Image (tube, rainbow, N blue to C red):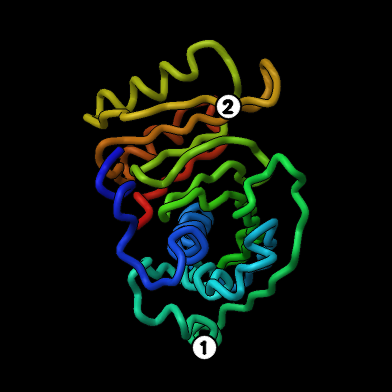
């Protein structure tokens, strides 16, 4: 446990889980898309759907999609700023079942050059979040660290090739997880690092033969 867990985030309220966490979820989704968001369909589940409007969850999610931080004083006016920025958004209620966290959201995003992405995650308390799906692929990361996401062929040596490249380039891996749907199919690595990775690091990983896609997500504030 760290001081952030004890006192919570510096934020515009009223709720760390429904407001600050929502901002961070929007920020994470924007980072995964990798470019400014121009259209967003936002699916709300459980408590987010039932009580989110009273806590400003809808405003906070849109603020996050614009790249704002949890302490941005403009959050209560996020809809007006989104209109000025040309960001189109809509909300819907979704039911992810009893197993899903009550503060769950799913984004369907379109970027400024037409790129599309789906991101799902939950606000788990104290402003902390967890992302558990990207473009339909199950995975898990928090956004607390700079993060590299890969989509790659599940084959022997794949993990060693990626970690070897990063080691040679002086990137220290703080935490790592590997996710896959089936043996020998597509898999995803989530590598949380002690320092931000640069364009050259990402290009080196992307150049490996088994890599289908690679994303870089800076730590989410």
Which residue position holds label 2?
179
Quick one: which residue is furthest to the front in this view? 6
Tell me the quadrant of the picture where the C terminus can be found.
Answer: bottom left
Quick one: which residue is furthest to the left in this view? 170
- Residue 98, above or below 221: above
Q: Which mark is residue 131?
A: none
Displayed quadrant of residue 138: top right
Residue 183 position in % (x across, y down): 68, 16
In this view, the residue in front, 71 or 197, is: 71
Residue 214 visible at all:
yes
81 left or right, relative to 182: left
Helix, strand or loop at mark 2? strand
Displayed quadrant of residue 20: bottom left
Residue beneath the point at 34% across and 55% down: 8
Q: Are marks 2 and 1 in contact (CB under 8 Å)?
A: no
Residue beneath the point at 47% across and 55% down: 28
Residue beneath the point at 27% across and 42% down: 2
Residue 39 position in % (x across, y down): 63, 71
The crowd level at tag 1 (other Cα within 10 Å; few <14, some 14-19, many 20+) is few
Going from the N terminus, do you reach mark 2 or mark 1 first?
A: 1
Residue 61 position in % (x across, y down): 53, 67
Which residue position holds label 1?
80
- Residue 187, above or below 26: above
118 left or right, relative to 148: right
């Amino acid at each position: 446990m760290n001081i952030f867990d004890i006192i919570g985030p510096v934020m515009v309220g009223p709720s760390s889980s429904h407001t600050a966490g929502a901002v961070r979820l929007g920020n994470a989704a924007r980072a995964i898309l990798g470019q400014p968001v121009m259209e967003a369909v936002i699916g709300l589940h459980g408590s987010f759907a039932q009580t989110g409007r009273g806590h400003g969850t809808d405003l906070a999610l849109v603020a996050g999609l614009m790249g704002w931080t949890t302490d941005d004083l403009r959050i209560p006016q996020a809809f007006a700023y989104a209109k000025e920025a040309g960001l189109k958004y809509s909300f819907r209620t979704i039911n992810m079942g009893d197993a899903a966290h009550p503060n769950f959201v799913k984004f369907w995003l379109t970027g400024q050059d037409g790129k599309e992405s789906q991101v799902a995650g939950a606000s788990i308390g104290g402003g902390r979040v967890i992302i558990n799906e990207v473009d339909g692929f199950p995975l898990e990361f928090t956004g607390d660290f700079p993060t590299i996401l890969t989509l790659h062929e599940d084959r022997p040596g794949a993990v060693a090739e990626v970690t070897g490249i990063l080691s040679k380039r002086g990137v220290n891996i703080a935490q790592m997880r590997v996710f896959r749907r089936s043996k020998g199919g597509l898999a995803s690595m989530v590598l949380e690092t002690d320092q931000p990775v640069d364009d050259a690091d990402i290009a080196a990983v992307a150049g490996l033969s088994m890599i289908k896609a690679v994303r870089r997500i800076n730590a989410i504030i």
